[in-house]
Image (cartoon, grey):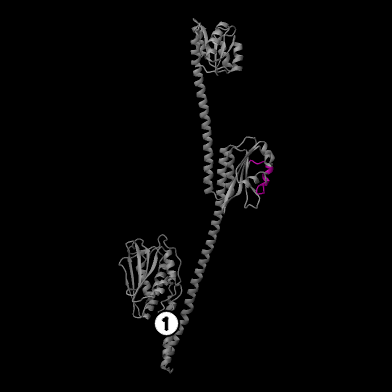
Amino acid sequence: MANGRDRILIVENDPVVADLIGRQALQSVGFQVATVGDANSAIARAIQWVPDLILTDINLPGLSGKDLLVALKSQGVQTPVVLLAQRGQESDIVQAFRLGAADYLLLPVREAEVVSAVERVLQQVHERRERERLSQQLQQTNQELQARVRELTTIFSIGKAVTSITDQTLLMDQILEAAVQVTRADLGWLLMRDSDEKPFVLTAAANLPASLEGFFGQPWDDGISKLVALSAETLTIHGEPLKRFKVSSLGQSALIAPIKAQKKTQHTVIGLLTMIRRQPVAFGSSEQHLLEALADYASIAVINAHLFRAAEERARSMQTLVEQMRMGEQINQEVLLALQEELRGPVAAASAALGKLGKDPTARWRSDQRQWLAAIQDQLDQLQRVVEAIQPLQSSAAGSEGVTSNLNELIRQVVQRARPFTQQAGLVVTTDLPPEGVVVGVEARVLGQVLHGLMSEAIRYGAEGGQIIIRLEKTPQRQAQVAFRNVGVHLDPREAERFFERTTRSTSEGRHFGGVGIRPAVIREVLTRLGGKVWLENSPGQGMTVYFSLPLTQSIQPGRKN
């Protein structure tokens, strides 16, 4: 079926044949037809008119149809050619095919044969053109896909840089370089400001003229950035409208994206990414979206930089605090040790002097005076035991790799150390310990202070002739559980409720002072930080019992030192 857009050039010097083929056969079915009578005219018309198919007689005056094939090829004309030949010219037809002829018709020819041959060749032409069109479209699509891949790769690399590069200047340079690349701009720059009241400062630039390089780190006014900062919306502008602004001296097309950060309940513009093309070629929506994505990355980079600086400052502050705490702890330890040394000598000297005074045969002491001397001696002995019990609390990390303590041994040591106090108070201490070692992941000195503090509390609340039972066991939940039980002792409910809130020494009348162990509030804080817990059970029939538990580690190995 004829396509009204197809053009047929007929090269025939016989008017009758030309009329038969052109007017009667081809024009009647809708083809556009032009007719010339010789090869020279055909070459000029083919170049000017650009037909879709050429029908030429092989026997033309002057240049023949075969010569026309050669001439068309030399002129770069790729139009297919159908030959008109007489019977007996088969050899010429073969030569013409070698020269590039598409088909042939033998004269005399019928109209239907002409139309059929023309449509057959044009079908091939249409298919070839469609293949070429599809090939070009595929090539263009591939190029666009490759461009998208490069753009996404660039965006991805910037995303990684935002999370890995802490140097904000280097990161902003990379963001600007990527922006120029993905938007296909000729030059660009990045402006930043610290607050709404301060001007924008040129932070980074790409391909700026040498005359403007001295503006780095200086306030920058290109005449258009302020408008974008006010609207907080991306702006694309090119051609005549751009000439109203100073930035037009650098190019004829601009794309500006705001860099926004949230402050309180609203977004504020903290920077601007500006891309410039020297030619008045507008930036597309895809390029605008890519630039906005990079502006978002720049915003994240700024926020990360602020957070990083805040974290560094906090870390420095914490380090200073830790150093001060360590220094304070060291001072406290030195003070306690110095106090122990200062008291030990005078107490011992006073006790010795008092003993000599009491045994002086020349002294005539009344009975009440001897009672006073005995009371003084008792208080000096008590003070001596307190001096010997002073143990500064050593700091240590709980749960550190390889740090373990054997609770069995620590309990035995605490009972042994407290014996002077329990004997003076008339208390009986018994222990119920498992035969195998019970190991927890806590440094021995810290855990020893906890046990010493609980022992001091048990002595403090114990009545003369009473009993303290210390029990150690493993629970099914893989916990080491320790109980300090005062048999027959019952606290007032209000006092029991505030037991772990007390940070000072109990002054309740009739209760024994049990040494200088850490107080219940500190005990609870230490055990909580160690991953354990502590609680009090208080009942009239069972007495008062303080429990604490800590996670178990592996069992103690034979021969292992605590």
Q: Can residue 562 be seen here?
A: no
Of 412 and 508, the residue lying toward us: 508
Seen at 44% across and 80% down, the residue is 383
Q: Residue furthest top?
A: 88
Secondary structure state at the residue bearing disc 1:
helix
- What are the residue bounds of the magenta stretch? 207-220
| The stretch drawn in magenta includes residue 500 | no
* 292 w.r.t. 48: above or below: below
Q: How packed is label 1: few (under 14 Cα within 10 Å), some, or many (20 or more)? A: some
Q: Quadrant of residue 358?
A: bottom left
Please provide percent x and percent y for residue 212.
68, 43
Q: Quadrant of the C terminus?
A: bottom left
Tell me if 527 is positioned left or right of 211 in this view.
left
The residue shown at (50%, 12%) is 115
Q: Which residue is mark 1?
A: 381
Q: Nearer the viewer, residue 189 or 411?
A: 189
Where 223 falls versus 534 (above or below)? above
Report the label total. Answer: 1
Q: Looking at the picture, how far across and down is residue 164, in whole percent? A: 52, 48
- Residue 356: percent from the left, percent from the top? 43, 88
- Residue at image position (54%, 35%) is 147
**Magenta stretch: includes residue 218:** yes
Residue 367, image quadrant: bottom left
Disc 1 residue type (three-letter)? Asp
Q: Toward which corner of the image does residue 224 lie, by quadrant?
A: top right
| Of 349 and 365, the residue lying toward us | 365
Query: Is residue 287 in sight in this rendering?
Result: yes
Q: Is residue 415 left or right of residue 107?
A: left
Q: Position of residue 157 (x, y in %)?
A: 52, 43
